[in-house]
Amino acid sequence: MIDAMLDFFQVDTTAELVWVVIGLCGQLVFTMRFIVQWIASEKERRVVVPELFWWFSIIGGATLLVYAIHRGDPVFMLGQSLGVFIYSRNLWLIYAEKRALDRG
């Protein structure tokens, strides 16, 4: 079974297969943000970007960044590192707004 997976993903070692699985998981989590946003928007009948969108963005983006670093892909690294910074900032702003509302 492992040999078939190595062939399918065109990798030579089990370690590289693990990295491909990490990359695929990161992409799946990153894709979930669009599904969450779409469902929330359909439910509200307007464009909505829920907080969970940003959590999926940061987790998926960070996982893809680790994968890009492993692969040594500078374009992928730059894109994901900038994204992770932006997603983090958006979460910071969401929590800052919540704190301000809690204080009254």
Image (cartoon, rainbow, N blue to C red):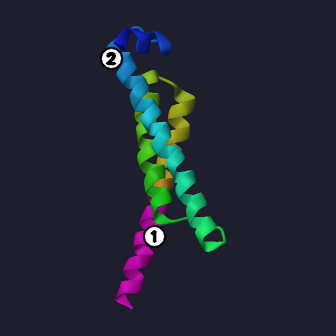
Q: Label 1 sits on what residue type? A: Ile
Task: Give, as a single range, the part of the protein colored magenta.
Answer: 88-104
Q: Secondary structure at mark 2?
A: helix
- Image spot of residue 22 (x, y percent): 39, 31
Identify the residue at image location x=43%, y=36%.
Answer: 25
Question: The N terminus appears in which quarter of the rendering?
Answer: top left
Residue 97 quadrant: bottom left
Which of the labelled discs sits on residue 94, or is there none? 1
Q: Secondary structure at mark 1?
A: helix
* Distance between mark 1 and mark 2 Cα atoms: 38 Å
Numbered circles on residues, count:
2
- Image spot of residue 44 (x, y percent): 61, 73
- Image spot of residue 52 (x, y percent): 45, 60
Packing grade of label 2 (10 A; few <14, some 14-19, many >=20) is few
Furthest residue toward bottom? 104
The kind of secondary structure the magenta stretch mainly shows is helix
Identify the residue at image location x=52%, y=52%.
Answer: 33
Q: Is residue 51 above or below residue 62?
A: below
- Image spot of residue 100 (x, y percent): 40, 82
**Left or right, 83 with reference to 14:** right
Q: Label 2 sits on what residue type? A: Ala
Q: Is residue 29 magenta?
A: no
Q: Is residue 68 above or below residue 99?
A: above
Q: Are marks 1 and 2 in contact (CB under 8 Å)?
A: no
- Which is nearer the eye, 86 or 26? 26
Disc with the residue nearer the chain's start (1 vs 2): 2
> Label 2: which residue?
15
